Image (cartoon, rainbow, N blue to C red):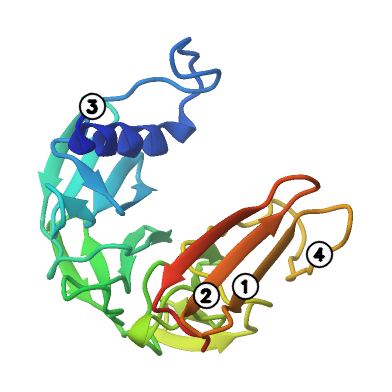
Amino acid sequence: MDSAAGRWNTLSILALAAACAAHDPELGRGWTRGPSLPEPIQENHAAALHGRIYTAGGFHFGSLVSAAVFRLDSPTGRWKRVANLPAPRHHMPLAVAGDSLYAVGGLSPDGFTAVSTVWLYDERNDRWMERAPLPEPRGASAVGVVDGRIIVVGGFGLKLRLLDSIAIYDPATNAWRHGAPIPTLRDHLAAARPRRGGARWQDLRDRRRPDVRVGADRRGRGVHAVARPARVEAEAHFPGTTRR
């Protein structure tokens, strides 16, 4: 489709198809085309719980912020709308810890204002429940789960300030604490857990690897994320952001 809505729909489905192993010549090896979402969505997140894929929030129908939550049931291969989020959100990560789905932070419909809300989805009763809020508001962050604890990395804070802090949530105590900060400020990032052994942050900046840096421009008007491989330079600029 040529419309923006059509492109959003396709991108969302492709992002959710990463676990599929079939080969579709049109999509490339390892990908298969899944059922389309009920509506166009972007800046949403997804997570899998009990063999079902959930996606929540995001922008839909242009710049409107959604509170809708959809679930893809594997047996039927169809999307079903479940209980709405308590409030609309975008750039809000989802995480599965134990047998529960969590919606962590995100950005509110009031521009790009970061929030600290944390919601737990009660799958049996189809409802969302509040849990202890994040230590500080943040959105466009990454989440991972290690040993049953949710780890939230980087993102935007209030006034679009980039964060290097890490917040760790223990579902058993419904409490947060801070972990070691990441080496550089980041937002719109990804996180993953290694299969074996421990993990620590490493600075990979040398002449043999891409150089990824973050810094303010000369006038202090924004933050530049710059990646410099051997011969190619890519730059992303986020207007109005400042260092923490």
Contact (CB < 8 A) between labels 2 and 3?
no
Q: Residues within 10 Å of mark 1 (few under 14, many from 20)?
A: some
- At horizontal 19% and vertical 32% (from top left) the residue drawn is 3
Q: Is label 4 or label 3 in front?
A: 3
Of mark 3 and mark 1, the one earlier in the sequence is 3
Q: Residues within 10 Å of mark 3 (few under 14, many from 20)?
A: few
Write down the residue under mark 3.
2
- At horizontal 56% and vertical 69% (from top left) the residue drawn is 224
Write down the residue under mark 1.
214
Q: CA distance from mark 4 to mark 3?
A: 40 Å
Tell me the SS state at disc 3: loop
**Left of 31 or right of it: where is 232?**
right
Of mark 1 and mark 4, the one earlier in the sequence is 4
Write down the residue under mark 4.
205
Q: Is residue 65 or residue 198 the one in the foreground? A: 65
- How far across and how far down the image is residue 80, in percent? 14, 39
Q: Residues within 10 Å of mark 2 (few under 14, many from 20)?
A: many
Write down the residue under mark 2.
223
Res 76 seen here: yes
Q: CA distance from mark 2 to mark 3?
A: 32 Å
Q: Amino acid at mark 1?
A: Val
Tell me the SS state at disc 4: loop
- At horizontal 16% and vertical 49% (from top left) the residue drawn is 60
Contact (CB < 8 A) between labels 4 and 2?
no
Q: Is label 4 or label 2 in front?
A: 2
Q: Amino acid at mark 4?
A: Arg
Contact (CB < 8 A) between labels 2 and 1?
yes
Of mark 4 and mark 3, the one earlier in the sequence is 3
Res 137 seen here: no
Vertical side of 145 occupied by 153: above or below: below
Q: CA distance from mark 1 to mark 4?
A: 12 Å
